[in-house]
Amino acid sequence: MKRRLTMGVAAAAVGTLLAACGAGGPGSGGGKISGGKLTLGVLTDLSGVYADLAGNGAVAAVQMAADDYRKKYGDKAVTQKIDVIKADHQNKPEVANTQAREMYERKGADAIFDVPTSSAALAVETVAAQQKKLYFNTGAATTELAGKSCNAYTYEWAYDSYMLAHGTGTQVTQQGGKNWYLIYPDYAFGQDMQAKFTPAIEGAGGRVVAKDPTPFPSDNYSTFLLKAPTLNPKPDVLGALQAGGDLANVVKQYDQFKVKDKGVKLAIGLLFDSDIKAIGADKLAGTMFTTAWFWNLDDRSRAWAQRFQKITGKLPTFDQAADYSAATAYLEAVQKAGTDKAASVSKVLDGMPLDDFFARNATVRAADHRVVHDAYLAKVKAPSEATQDGDYTELVRTIPAAQAFDKPSPDCHLG
Amino acid sequence: MTSFLQQLFNGLVSGSFYALLALGLAVIFGMLRVVNFAHGALYMLGAFGAVVLGDDAGLGFWWALLLVPAALAVAGMAMERLLVQRLTALDPLYNFLLTFGIALVCQDLLRMKYGSHSRPYDRAPFGGTVDLGLFDYPRYQVFVLAVSVVVCVAVWLLLTRTRIGTVVRASTERPELTRAFGIDTRRWVTPVFGFGVALAGLAGVLAAPMRAVNSDMGADLIITVFAVVVIGGLGSVFGSVVAGFAIGMIQALGNLYVPVLSQTSVYLLMAVVLLVRPAGLFGKEEHA
């Protein structure tokens, strides 16, 4: 609660400045584009735990999409004026709500992108529906976004807890990890992950021997690490569903308690490249996880990742790649619709097939606005196998789009 | 039974950190009547110090254990001289705001430089486990417990068995009377502050091999440590150490037997202690 006031103020100041600069007279060109320009809002965590995996990298990705669009269409573009604005939601739903309102109403954002943290993501979803403006989420894991909270203005682009659980839970169980011990942080994300992992494991013929909630945040996991090998039957896999700093604590202590030597392998619910860097690839080598994308997937991905790295100095995470994919699809849809009216753009997007470096064999599902695309079961490379700095991920198996995501939820009514 | 003993031992290990941090807070509060809200940030700086020494200077864990607390002691003394001292005559609220502000500045600077993710640290002095009879335990964590116990006992001896300790305690408990004996109590304020900060740095270095090193690590921990200090009795050195280890054990048992209470147990205990003994378990009531 006490964190990052300064950054928030700075972000607000930058936002205000951008809005002030952009207020140069309406009707300047671009007939059907309101105000003659497009404004893409990136609402993200600029200062907290997700700032590395989303943050300014997400802003850079959306900016790249805008630049590429302008270059591609030149004079034929519906407008050459595309502003990218950003704001810090501090991972808090109430801040996200205010910032989203501010972006749509005062700064004229046509669409909002990114938004990590499920509670904040859901808050923005409500605002998008009220404002009748588009919203492309790439950062949050909850299936609720395209489930019971879904609406006509919100698109879920990158991943969700179902994808993570069914990738890792199903595949690892099928490969012989029959008995699981799940530890999950005791808040919305952890509970949601646990609720998705358990049926995935059981559906693949495995068994959850025990599951324990862990305090959030916590820096001591010894209780659970000592307990793991003593359970009866002894679990084959410890499923750690923690994120960020908590995950780093789990892995460091898993290593110190020699749980692997006692025959309990580690599987991780949600793992970003930035986590692997934070923990050290040597400690994670061989760990299985599911990801929506990784930069070293193939030539197309590498080419984009290198461009991104030139701009930001860092390799992209899947969240940032998804931001580019979503912003590009949005701009293409505006181009095709010839207007930035949400309903018209949405009509182009719904059911649209996609094939960019991020979204493979993908479709924007019309029923619930979930983008289904190939996902990847991966494992962490040992540092000795890495070809370069930041090369952490080895592909184990591609999970086809049709299997990677759940069927549209019966609770979703786009309205 | 084994798992019960295991939990007690887990609790002692996390208690090691609480005790070291609470001890530093207690010493500082005793001498200056300042609640140092920057203590968690200083713990975080200790851990980052170990990481940076390792990454940038190639110095291993033992060097960090020596250099980082020393460097932080100097920084702490500078902080006391340049900032804290100016406000001690005013309402304690001013130093509360100052130290809290220092904590936020430290956290944000580190986040700007290193990002919000944790930093890896793989210079643990030893790996492997050690057989404790009933169960195996990571060798490093047993070492942490040993260091913490040794430091706490040493500080206790220093305070009770040496002349320096006598002077410090006298300045803490009866500053006017001590001055009347011709002892310059203010001379001891800066070194004591530096010493308390060094203890936070030491805890931070010890944490680096076993905990996530990031800019938030201190903010998350320090709230519990404040509860520990209140339970032990503000300014009571003995109380803060005992409460530190006790809270560690209570949390660990809570983790296993009553997970819903593992986090709240500390605050419940704090509430009960405050109701029954407002000055804490080992604190002395002050009569103004």
Image (cartoon, helix red, strand yellow):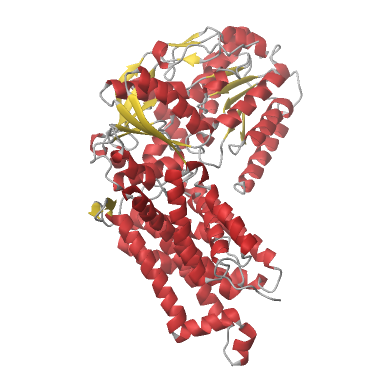
Q: Position of residue B128 (x, y in %)?
A: 24, 51
- Closer to us: A278 or B139: B139
Residue visible at 48% across and 49% down in the picture = B113
- Closer to us: B51 or A218: A218
Q: Residue furthest front?
A: B1
Q: Position of residue B275 (x, y in %)?
A: 64, 60
Q: Quadrant of the C terminus of chain A?
A: top right
Q: Is residue A142 above or below residue B287?
A: above
Q: Quadrant of residue A277?
A: top left
- Numbered circles on residues, count: 0
- Closer to us: A335 or B11: B11
- Residue B196 appears in view: yes
Q: Position of residue A56 (x, y in %)?
A: 53, 36
Q: Is residue B20 above or below residue A20?
A: below
Left or right of residue A275, residue A22 in this image: right
- Closer to us: B173 or A60: B173
Q: Position of residue A31 (x, y in %)?
A: 71, 12
Q: Is residue A2 above or below residue A116?
A: below
Q: Is residue A137 above or below residue A275?
A: above
- Residue A339 appears in view: no
Residue visible at 63% across and 40% down in the picture = A11
